[in-house]
Image (cartoon, rainbow, N blue to C red):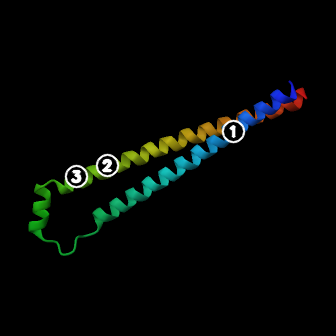
Amino acid sequence: MKKKTAAALKKLVGLKRQRAEQDMAEAQFALERAQTDLAAMRAALQAPAEPVDFAAVSLAERNGSSRRLVEQLRSQESLVEERRTALAEATDRLRLAFGSQQVLERSLRQGG
């Protein structure tokens, strides 16, 4: 393999690996943010309101406030799962990029 071609391949594989690392870091950050938001939502739902007033609780129930909060919580849980999936995919892409880089380096050592 020509030196120019080998250098171009090394650069291309290196850029691919770098992009995979960035994607994985972004996916990790997004997952951590979603988990933090979910924990905050759960804590807010568990915290008792100031003085518990039956009329206020009843009014909130009739207006759907508690159902809306539970729906938001379920939506956030779903988002956390999506972020976990995205992180797993980014991790796989990074693993493949490292593998490509190692295969290229081995083939260049053997061929050169």
Element at label 1? helix
Q: Residue at x 52, y 53 (%)?
A: 29
> Which residue is found at the position 91% from the left and 29% from the top?
112
Q: Are marks 1 and 3 in contact (CB under 8 Å)?
A: no
- Looking at the image, residue 75 sits to the left or right of residue 2; the answer is left
Q: Quick one: quadrant of the N terminus?
A: top right
| Mark 2 surroundings: few (<14), some (14-19) or many (≥20) residues within 10 A | few
Instruction: Say which residue label 2 marks.
Output: 74
- Residue that mark 1 sits on: 15
Which residue is pictured at 57% across the width and 44% down the height? 23
On screen, 91 above or below 111? below
Give residue 20's position: percent from left, percent from top: 62, 41
Res 43 quadrant in image = bottom left
Does residue 106 appear left or right of residue 73 in this picture?
Answer: right
Q: Does residue 83 appear anywhere in the picture? A: yes
Q: Position of residue 44 (x, y in %)?
A: 31, 64
Which is more N-terminal, label 2 or label 3?
3
Look at discs 1 and 2 and give the one toward the viewer: 1
1 or 2: tag closer to the N-terminus: 1
Q: Is residue 100 left or right of 69 when viewed as pictured?
A: right
Q: CA distance from mark 1 to mark 2?
A: 38 Å
Query: Which quadrant would residue 8 be assigned to in this image?
Result: top right
Of circles 1 and 3, the one toward us is: 1
Of tags 3 and 2, which is closer to the observer?
3
Numbered circle sitting on residue 68: 3
Count up the numbered dots: 3
Label number found at residue 36: none
